[in-house]
Amino acid sequence: MAAAKKAVLGPLVGAVDQGTSSTRFLVFNSKTAELLSHHQVEIKQEFPREGWVEQDPKEILQSVYECIEKTCEKLGQLNIDISNIKAIGVSNQRETTVVWDKLTGEPLYNAVVWLDLRTQSTVENLSKRIPGNNNFVKSKTGLPLSTYFSAVKLRWLLDNVRKVQKAVEENRALFGTIDSWLIWSLTGGINGGVHCTDVTNASRTMLFNIHSLEWDKELCEFFGIPMEILPSVRSSSEIYGLMKAGALEGVPISGCLGDQSAALVGQMCFQDGQAKNTYGTGCFLLCNTGHKCVFSEHGLLTTVAYKLGRDKPVYYALEGSVAIAGAVIRWLRDNLGIIKSSEEIEKLAKEVGTSYGCYFVPAFSGLYAPYWEPSARGIICGLTQFTNKCHIAFAALEAVCFQTREILDAMNRDCGIPLSHLQVDGGMTSNKILMQLQADILYIPVVKPSMPETTALGAAMAAGAAEGVGVWSLEPEDLSAVTMERFEPQINAEESEIRYSTWKKAVMKSIGWVTTQSPESGIP
């Protein structure tokens, strides 16, 4: 029986999905894209000071090993032979910055997370050096100068952490985003680990020229980054190296995509004009713009979507980035304690069915797209004696939807062709109230795949399709049809507009809250 079962499955592909709030390892059938098994571990976030967000790179790596081992055990219980796993893909939270010692394999400081705001004064000082008539940073990278991207985090580490400075002087330091740290560690670490990244992750560092697809000397000089600490840049789908430890030793790591690019691939948005919105810690709307870089007039980023093979063409995307989506639910759970688990928010919101005039702008890390306003902070307004925790829960869900509406409006203005529906994915999409609210606030249908783990699926597709692996076909006729759930708008357009314009009023009240940044102090 077991043998027959194994024979039916054919080649499998694993995917590491290392997100901001959790790590997962998932295993897919490469012929049907069916999810066979997975394991998830929540990751601690540390907030050592106001506006600072850090994670422990060793805890992240440990969580990856744990998820792989546990998933392999679960496959064993299902009578599935893990020797069928032919490749592994990596997808990761982007921009988060790690510097480690290549001789000891030890991180030289905690990972500075994408949401972290400590670099605000670094950003202000750097922006004074960009000529008004020639924003070469934006034209080369597609990105606005912001605390969000890796270069300023790396600059801060070089300025403030003696261990990092010393390692750079002694040529022991390696820099990477989370994908690089994981791939280097998984492929052997101090014993021949491969120090690489892919074009999608590189395009989020602010050191990468998205036209020439290489590290840019002028940008590295501007930020004062020594080029020898940077990883080599590869395509998103090729064999980088082999797993050197654990249950999957010897399996090639052959896919690497920043999480939002991975979701674009997993949602099969391979055509110019196709878009998806992922609801994770933040919210990220990406629209494939084909082989051309489209620069936004409305506060969106231009970024690399994917390059699925060494000799394959590069695809670009416009991106609307919202910092806080699922993170607001975690905040209600961990900071306010009004829910015990993230799932509970749906129950609270359902009890009232309205925010009753209460609006929540979760600008915990300033505002990202389309405002790029670091001075903003979170506010809850429209409170009365009638307001209770259910209304606040509802307002938190609405906030996610309103923020999505803002980036969708910007996307429609930039592209000129309004999206007729929105493809969605990510952990929060299991919340039916949220999905219905989103359809109501956008006033277009929201379409969700029945298997919401599209980020991991995208990484698995890239890994399985890599040259030398070849177990996953990305030809349109071979891609399995995905079953979808649709949410149609149920309120009238006028009511939708009134709520949206009140939201915008609330956003204006959140801006300009922090006038001068508190001085950043060095760290011993």
Image (cartoon, grey):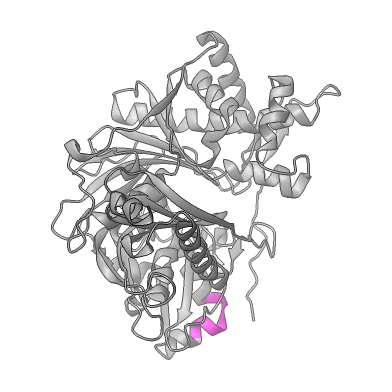
Query: At 49% across and 44% down in the image, what residue appears?
Result: 372
Residue 444, x across and y down, in percent: 43, 19
Query: At 52% across and 44% down in the image, what residue appears?
Result: 280
Seen from this angle, which residue lies furthest left?
311
Residue 509, x across and y down, in percent: 65, 33
State whether residue 200 appears in this view.
no
Query: At 46% across and 51% down in the image, what residue appears?
Result: 37
Q: Determine whether 519 is above or below 407 in the image.
A: below
What's the magenta region? 159-165
State whether residue 37 appears in this view.
yes
Query: At 27% across and 69% down in the image, what residue appears?
Result: 240
Observer-nearest residue: 176 or 503? 176
Q: Main secondary structure of the magenta part?
A: helix
Residue 401, x across and y down, in percent: 54, 29
- Quarter-of-image position of residue 320: top left
Circle count: 0
Q: Determine whether 197 is above or below 486 in the image.
A: below
Q: Is residue 252 magenta?
A: no
